Amino acid sequence: MYHSFYALKAPESAGPQHSSHSSVTVAAASAATLPCHAPANPPPTFIWYKDQTLVAHVKPREHSFVVGGFLVIPVVGVDDAGDYRCVVNNSVGVTTLTTHLEVTIPLKVQVTPEVTEVMVGEILELRCTVTGFPVSDVLWYKDASPIQSDGRHRVLEDRAQFGAPGAARPSHLRRLRVQSALATDAGAYQCRAVGPRDVAHAHAMLPATHHQRVNVNGTLTIAAITRAGDEGSYSCTALDKQGRSEQQTLHIQVKVPPQLAPLTFVGGNRAGLRAQAMCLVLAGDPPLSLRWYKNGQEVDAGSSDVIITHANDFSSSLSIEQTLGKHAGNYTCSATNSASTASSSAVLVVNASGNWGDISGGLMPAKTATPLHEDVGYDSGITYRGSEFSSNTFGEGGRSLVVVEAIQDHGGRYLCQASNGVGAGLSKVITIVVHEPPTFSTSERRVEVAVGGKATFICQARGDAPLTLRWLRNNFTISSDARYSVESADDKVESNGRELRLTIHRTEATDGGDYHCMATNGHGTNSALHHLLVQDVPAPPLAVTVAETTSRSLTLTWQEATSPHGSDVPVRRYVVLLTSDRDIPKEVAVHSTPAKLTDLVPATRYFLRVAAENSVGRSDLTDVLTATTLDEPPTGHPRNVKALSSTSTALRLQWEPPLPNTTHGKILGYYLGHRENRFVEYIDPNGPPEHVACEPLSSHSLLVRWTPPPPERANGIITSYRVAYRQLHETELTETDSEMLPGRVIHKSNSGFGIPKSLQSLPLAFSSSVGTSGDGGVLVVVEDQQARLVSLRAYTNYSVSISAATAVGVGVPSDPIVCSTLEDVPSPPEAIKIVAAGRSSAIVSWRLPKETRGRITSYAVRWRCGPRSAETRTVDPNEDHFTITGCLDSKVEVWYRNFVLTAWVAADTSVGRGKESNSATTTTSVSVGAGVWSVGGDVSVAWRRDVTLPCDAVGQPEPSKRWAQDGRDIVEDSRVSVISSGKLRIVDAQRSHSGRYTCTATNTHGSDSVTYHLSVISE
């Protein structure tokens, strides 16, 4: 923040005497302090105005005054800019201080498009968007040079893009338009925004050509390289998925090759005259080397009749003082530098009567065009015609025979005859020898072989002797050893050819790769590429683990197998080798991971190994992994049960255990039962109804069904049934029972639960209720084997037991079963609380609904900030609080320093949403007083169990916390302690710990508390 100001000082018993000016510059979204310092006696009052309007009316409840009259704006916006006037007044006089507030936003520039292409003659337009404030100027540059508006270049300003007053980020738009684009318009364009304290810029590219191209493999290809456009440093950066990078830089220096002017001879076309040729290098980087050649042979600079003169580094002249017939020929000037070699040739013709000129011939490589400077060519008396030869005329009386593509058949003697009608004429014989460099019938081969097999490469080459062949890999010559054999087979090719074979025995995966056959003779070197692909079995899977275990299945996971280096054979399937102590080993084929192995035996230990297979074969097996399936209830029964007499009132039983394959686990015990096989007429039934089952009909009703007791246990005619039911509480269910499905039998003692004795002989109607309620009761059913229980509580476990009755009385009840009603919408959260957490935020918290009536799936938090519309968010069911933020997002409300925030909470089940809680209200403020958002209330804990009472709070500065029991500060001991988060921890709770516990949080701006009523319940 930049500011300057002047303080106003008044003498004692005097008022402010004069006005002054100051200026303050701050960045948007930061705080601004506007000075107004005017000591006076008596102490003055301070009133601030902005643009002639009272500040309190412009920004209600947003500005705060500090000692001395300074005006503080906590969060400055763009529309805060302007003139502020401080009026200082006391009983003696009045003075004013005017302060100008300037708000800045960092400049940011964006040019679009960043890279573009246009055709020559089209319009090029680039857009430059500038955000930030203030902006002094926006300029365009091309290749670092300012662009001036002219007939083709125009810079257009779009005034509609300037930010309106109060906008958060005013913007400028400057467009650069180039009419009738030319090739010279290609380059780097830059838009630069300039402010009083800030400069920003962005670039766009108009590529000149597409001769620079980055290939998929990362290679940069530059076509038609030039020094002006391509010389410099190039950096290549490689990035991986984790964001790591590596960079290398290469400097390219472009060398200009030599370029020669056409070479011509002046004079010398007649014997005895002088002749001269000038060799001039028009372009090319030094140092340059200039040489002269005649008919391919370098000219001796020391010759007495041929003079070579080097005037400077880029020119040379060849002079002949008196030309003779021997000087005729093809002269070449050659210029060489570090980039390349260039040459220019000219034929010097010397006319002389009756003599041969320079007739040349001799050696030539195969497949080249070779000129022979003669009149007509003959061989064995045959005059040559056709496409293999051509004849060219040069000078006066000169003619050449050209062999277009020389082959071995062109070798031999050639006769040239010349006649001008004067005398007998001339003739000469020329011998041509054609040399052949190494060649191959095929330049590349691919060989595939399975690992352990034999790979053979055959290399056949032609060429002049002596012709040598050798095999190389990684630039090293291969010699015969235990696995590699290099053998010559020249008898299998024609006379001017050779064959060299490379055989690799017992191939390994590391043998895969490139092999080169190198052929060399006196006329050159050539090579042929052979690629070997060794197909290997895959590597075994990694990290084999058991992901899931049941009594009948195991699920395995692993990391997929990879191909060895040099092999590229995909994995077709995986094989799991499964063995146990009981069964023979077996293989299970799967195609991917995870793999589920089914049809296993319960309570059995299995040994597991995994291998991968491809078309070559199977990988090694992984290490042994041991897993044991879970237990199941036995399906077999005890064998050979025998009852032996013991006494007159006792029996002794003996038996053998079930078969091992039917126990499905370790036998923990046996259940014994017995009954007397006799019938007592007309007494209470001594057997309960059977097959008792229930199903929920709604959230408030159940349907119970049963079958009569066995006849031998009915003890008479069944006249009615008593259905006794009662609500079960959490403390009555074990950890397993609490998740019971409706209708499951409780395997524990009846605990006296059944038909009250007072009701056992009561005469009842067809179906009637006795003392029924939502907590439980007894329902009597006559002539039916089902009953409907109504007026029950939603999502509640009920214990149901059925007793049969004869005319004599009520028999024993069935084992109780647990039946559950369906879910319903929950009641509102039992308590809700809200505390301010900052200028624009608050925390709302709540307690579980008193009646959940189902499994809570989520909470709905609804709130309203000041005059704004209400908002709603869904919260996870495991949460008990929610932080409300964003109350200052709207421009309309940004000036409210304090506002009222109201919240409601509702709970959801799978059935729907329950009613909302009562509203909770708080008022936000710049200063955050201590606020405890933990919700207190009644808390019960079993005797000698542990309990924790939370005290979660907010505040700036962070509040201190203090716990008290029944109004007295907590004294920590071995059982009672305050842990680091401020929670109160009671270990091994005793009856003396019951009472009222209060946590109070305090900071410099206020205090808040939460109270719990703790009850320690005896067993």
Image (cartoon, grey):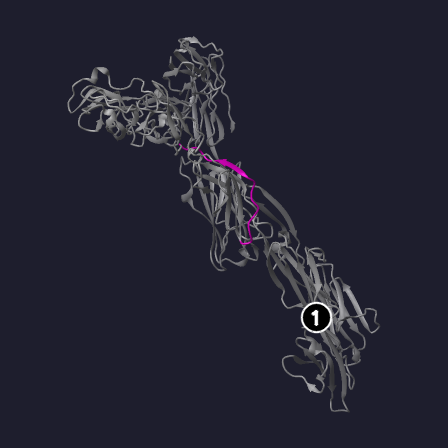
Q: Is residue 584 left or right of residue 718?
A: right
- Give the residue pinned by disc 1: 491
Between 194 and 241, which is closer to the camera in this rendering? 241
Q: Is residue 331 above or below residue 669?
A: below
Q: Is residue 830 left or right of residue 385?
A: left
Q: Position of residue 393 (x, y in %)?
A: 68, 81
Q: Is residue 521 left or right of residue 740?
A: right
Q: Which secondary structure is most common in the magenta stretch? A: loop
Q: How many marks are shown on the rendered structure?
A: 1
Q: Is residue 748 left or right of residue 182?
A: left
The reply to whether residue 502 is in sight is: yes
Between 345 and 316, which is closer to the camera in this rendering? 345
Give the amino acid type for the residue marked by disc 1 in the picture. Asp
Identify the image quadrant of residue 265. bottom right
Q: Residue at x 71, y 72 (%)?
A: 496
Callout 1 environment at 10 Å: few (<14), some (14 to 19), or many (20+)? few
Secondary element type, mark 1: helix
Kindly give the residue lying farthest to the left in the view shown: 765
Q: Position of residue 379 (x, y in %)?
A: 71, 84
Q: Is residue 507 above or below residue 194?
A: below
Between 502 and 211, which is closer to the camera in this rendering? 502
Q: Position of residue 721 (x, y in %)?
A: 21, 24
The reply to whether residue 281 is in sight is: no
Identify the image quadrant of residue 480. bottom right
Q: Residue at x 53, y 38 (%)?
A: 625
* Magenta segment: 615-633
* Residue 628 lies in the magenta-colored region: yes
Image quadrant holding the C terminus, namely top left
Kindly give the residue lying farthest to the top in the view shown: 968
Between 2 and 326, which is closer to the camera in this rendering? 326
Q: Is residue 515 above or below residue 299?
A: above
